[in-house]
Amino acid sequence: MPPAEALRFERDAVIAWRDGRIEAFGAAAEILPRLPPATPVTHFERALIVPGFVDCHVHYPQMPIIGAGGHPLLEWLERYTFPAEQAFMDEGYARKVARSFLRELMRNGTTTAAVFCTVHAVSAEALFAEAEPTGLRIVAGKCLMDRNAPAALSDTAQRGYDESKALIERWHGRGRLGYAVTPRFVASSTPAQLEAAAALWRGHPGTLLQSHLAENVDEVAWVRSLFPECTDYVDVFDRFGLLGRGAIHGHGVHLSERERARLAESTTALAHCPTSNFFLGSGLFDLAAAKRRNVPIPVGLATDVGAGTTLSMLATMGAASRVAQMRGNPLDPVQALWLATAGAAQALTLEDRVGDLAPGLDADVVVLDLAATPLLTERMSRVEDIGDMLAVLSTLGDDRCVRATYAAGMPVWSRQESPAEAQ
Ligand SMILES: [Zn+2]
């Protein structure tokens, strides 16, 4: 989307909402006189107000191992991730980590997230139960893994199907919660389990399907050896009926033109996870290639914590810009914000609910502090336009910039004073 169409900017704006939905967004001079008398108004100075961020691929059980690194994907999974995920068979522990994960989302201004749990059904139960009272929009699913994983992290095709179905019936569509059928990646599921995943997804309209795709060269080679009858990685998903609108696959770093064409044609989305790709040395996602066609591949930005190094979508926007620079196709900062909000919402097929400040959408709103640090204050005094402001925010900004977060109109995070003011 061209930068001019990706953003509507108002210098002195009002966002009005009622019962969790946005009613009006526009110039203060226009909206304020129309508000009913006694409408409470909160005013923010030195702030940029944007839609709540949408993180379209993140693993909450990996938050405790963020930063454990120095290894490529497959070794990182063996050494750190699989051992850490085994603890999530305990619901008490899972709830504790889920609580702290959700608090981090709110502190970072993320109001919608698509989340991987572990193979344990209780890990998904714990996340949904903790998320419900927060008012955040959380789409999540238990991982399906019935091969190439430790015994303690393995289910079977039947058990994975039964547990996922029970979770869908209990949580999908309850408040702002949704279910994503979650085969971890095709190397960790047997053909029988991939068939079961497709049956679950197709059998429950409105659920999403999330997985991983072509993240790392060794993984791509491994998948090819596991599915010799398939043309390529995307073809594995295709043969099992795991492409289409509502499917979102993480990474897509190593794709052929044929694979990109098939993703675009089938409206299958990709989650671009730049800090994770840097951290594991997976490669540089080619955003320009994903967007080259008349009908482009839906792409959203994502943190992919714990391989990702931050839960801040601002910092993730900065990382996406650096990947694009390395690729020789600079990313406009306005487009980076679009990918972290409206683009990610579209990738999750939630564009009629979140990702924008348009009337009728959920009132998910983040107030960004333009004076969060001394350097940011200094630099902001020199910005010339909104593009410049976003470029600086995504370079210097992170959770320190989030002054307030609203989910469906309710305040879920608020910082009374900026760190710069407190000094
Ligand atoms: Zn991931």
Image (tube, helix red, strand yellow):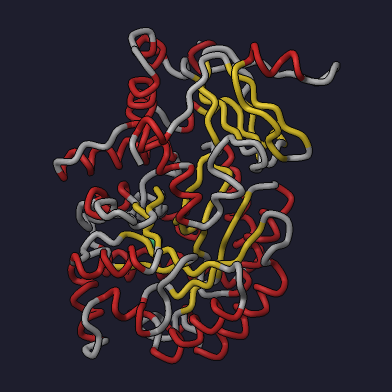
In the depicted view, which residue is nearer to us: 87 or 126? 126
Q: Establish if 196 lies above or below 185.
A: below
Quadrant in which ligand 1 is drawn = bottom left
Which quadrant holds residue 71?
Answer: bottom left
Residue 58: % across, % down: 46, 55
**Res 223 → quadrant:** bottom left
User: Which residue occupies 50% across, 11% down?
Assistant: 423
Q: Residue at x 62, y 62 (%)?
A: 178
Task: From the viewer's perspective, tell me whether residue 382 is left or right of residue 357.
Answer: left
Q: Position of residue 92 (x, y in %)?
A: 66, 63
Identified at 70% across, 47% down, the residue is 135
The answer to whether residue 38 is left or right of residue 69 is: right
> x%, y% of residue 129?
70, 60
Measured along the vertical axis of the image, is residue 286 above or below residue 42?
Answer: below
Name the side, left or right, on which 44 lies relative to 198: right
Residue 231 x %, y %: 21, 82
Residue 338 seen by the camera: yes
